[in-house]
Image (spheres, rainbow, N blue to C red):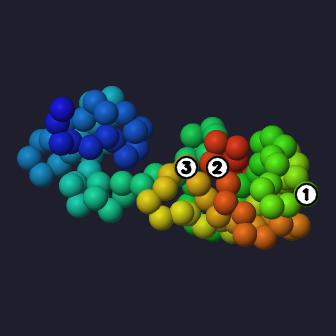
């Protein structure tokens, strides 16, 4: 398998190196090796939208919260999320009623 990383724009692995540039054959996106090293971690919500620190997300289904008797209901808004370092599947945030949540991104959508 080649050492060429997946495309940071479309996340497909049909990429190749052309001199100092990396090129995606599927979407045509071009980037340098320095850019790919800085942006290896891409956090996406359940719909595939890219999440960044400080974004607002919405819970897409009722979730039980460990250590609390209060569940997170569908539609609960989590404001000012924080990304978990080296983990693209989890984010940290606070709801109005529960503080210090760690949530899986597959149960969230960008608001």
Q: Is residue 32 above or below residue 26?
A: below
**Residue 5 can be seen in this image:** yes
**Residue 79 can be seen in this image:** no
Q: Residues within 10 Å of mark 2 (few under 14, many from 20)?
A: some
In the displayed structure image, the side of residue 46 where residue 29 appears, left or right: left
Query: Mark 3 or mark 1: which is in front?
Result: 1
Identify the residue at image location x=17%, y=48%: 21
Q: Earlier in the sequence, mark 1 or mark 2?
A: 1
Identify the residue at image location x=28%, y=30%: 14
Q: Residues within 10 Å of mark 3 (few under 14, many from 20)?
A: some
Give the CA separation, mark 2 to mark 3.
Answer: 6 Å
Q: Nearer the viewer, residue 66 or 104?
A: 66
Q: Is residue 96 above or below residue 108?
A: below
- The answer to which image quadrant residue 38 occupies is bottom left
Give the CA separation, mark 3 to mark 1.
Answer: 23 Å
Pointer 1 with pointer 2, Cβ within 8 A? no
Give the CA separation, mark 1 to mark 2.
Answer: 18 Å
Q: Earlier in the sequence, mark 3 or mark 1?
A: 1
**Residue 77, position in %: x, y?**
81, 57
**Residue 3, position in %: x, y?**
18, 42
Give the secondary structure at mark 2. Answer: strand
Give the secondary structure at mark 3. Answer: loop
Tag shown at residue 28: none
Q: Residue furthest left?
A: 19
**Residue 94, position in %: x, y?**
76, 67
Pointer 2 with pointer 3, Cβ within 8 A? yes
Query: Mark 1 or mark 2: which is in front?
Result: 1
Identify the residue at image location x=46%, y=52%: 42
**Residue 93, position in %: x, y?**
70, 66
In the displayed structure image, the side of residue 106 where residue 61 appears, left or right: right
The residue that label 1 is drawn on is: 70
The residue that label 2 is drawn on is: 104
């Amino acid at each position: 398998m080649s050492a060429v990383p997946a495309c940071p724009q479309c996340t497909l692995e049909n990429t190749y190196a052309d001199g100092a540039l990396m090129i995606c054959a599927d979407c045509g996106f071009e980037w340098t090796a320095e850019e790919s090293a800085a942006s290896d971690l891409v956090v996406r919500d359940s719909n595939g939208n890219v999440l960044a620190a400080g974004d607002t997300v919405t819970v897409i289904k009722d979730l039980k919260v460990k250590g609390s008797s209060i569940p997170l209901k569908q539609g609960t808004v989590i404001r000012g999320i924080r990304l978990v370092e080296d983990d693209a599947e989890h984010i940290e945030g606070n709801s109005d009623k529960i503080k210090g949540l760690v949530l899986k991104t597959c149960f969230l959508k960008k608001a």
